[in-house]
Amino acid sequence: MLSAPVWKYFVAHSLASTVAAFAILFVIVGISFAYVSANPVTVQNNPQTEQRPWTGISGSNLTPAIAKAMGTNEQSGFLVVEVAPNSPAEKAGIKGGDRAVTVDGRQVLVGGDIIIEVDGQPVTGFTDIQQHFQQKHVGDTMRFTVVRGSVTMQIPVVLEESPAT
């Protein structure tokens, strides 16, 4: 520990120490401004203001139990349960569920389209659709291959901007 007389010299204020402190401060601030001026900031798009695409569908993964309750031969895919009104999916003609059944003790809306492919790639569930969707932008088209009853068809859906939530 420093003795009191030595410590006094470190905290003593004088005209010379004040001038030296301000000189150091001005040099540091000057260097900082020079650095900022030489390295301009690049403004990136704010994810909150970017247009987010949407399809307007919701559903669940098709399980063998749900497939059995529906009477379909499909064993995997994504079952469309609901299609939002005036959504891209509704405009394209994708159908949601129309009747409720009990599967494994819970109510499931069935009868909707079963998505089995997106852009020619197999779909086993929601994760597959989400992976394709993340690469899309407003105005892009997603090509869904769906099973409706016993008919397999391709339905192109043009993605629109997600409504404010």
Image (tube, rainbow, N blue to C red):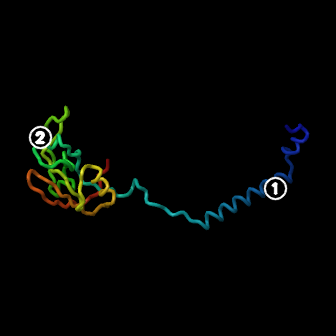
Q: Is residue 114 above or below residue 136?
A: above
| SS at mark 2 in the image | strand
Image side of residue 42 versus residue 117, left or right:
right
The residue most toward the left is 150
100, 125: nearer the viewer = 125
Q: In this view, does 105 lie above or below 12?
A: above
Q: In this view, does 133 lie above or below 5?
A: below
Q: Residue 99: where, in percent of width, then height? A: 11, 40
- Residue that carries the numbered disc 2 in the rendered image: 99
Where on the picture, by quarter, is residue 51? bottom left
162, 130: nearer the viewer = 130
Residue located 23% across and 57% down the image:
122
From the viewer's perspective, is the residue at label 2 or at label 1 nearer? 2
- Identify the mark at residue 34; answer none if there is no mark: none
Mark 2 is surrounded, within 10 Å at the Cα level, by few (under 14), some (14 to 19) or many (20 or more) other residues, namely few
Q: Residue 143: where, in percent of width, then height? A: 21, 61
Residue located 61% across and 66% down the image:
37
Mark 1 is surrounded, within 10 Å at the Cα level, by few (under 14), some (14 to 19) or many (20 or more) other residues, namely few
Q: Residue 52: where, in percent of width, then height? A: 33, 56
80, 39: nearer the viewer = 80
Residue type, label 2: Arg
| SS at mark 1 in the image | helix
Q: Residue 13: where, in percent of width, then height? A: 85, 47
Sequence-wise first label, 2 or 1: 1
Q: Tell me the distance, in whole angstroms, between the alpha carbons under discs 2 and 1.
A: 82 Å
Residue type, label 1: Ala
For the N terminus, the image quarter is: top right
Residue located 19% across and 50% down the image:
85
- Residue that carries the numbered disc 1 in the rendered image: 20
Image side of residue 29 versus residue 145, left or right:
right
Say whether marks 2 and 1 touch (CB < 8 Å): no
Residue located 11% across and 52% down the image:
148
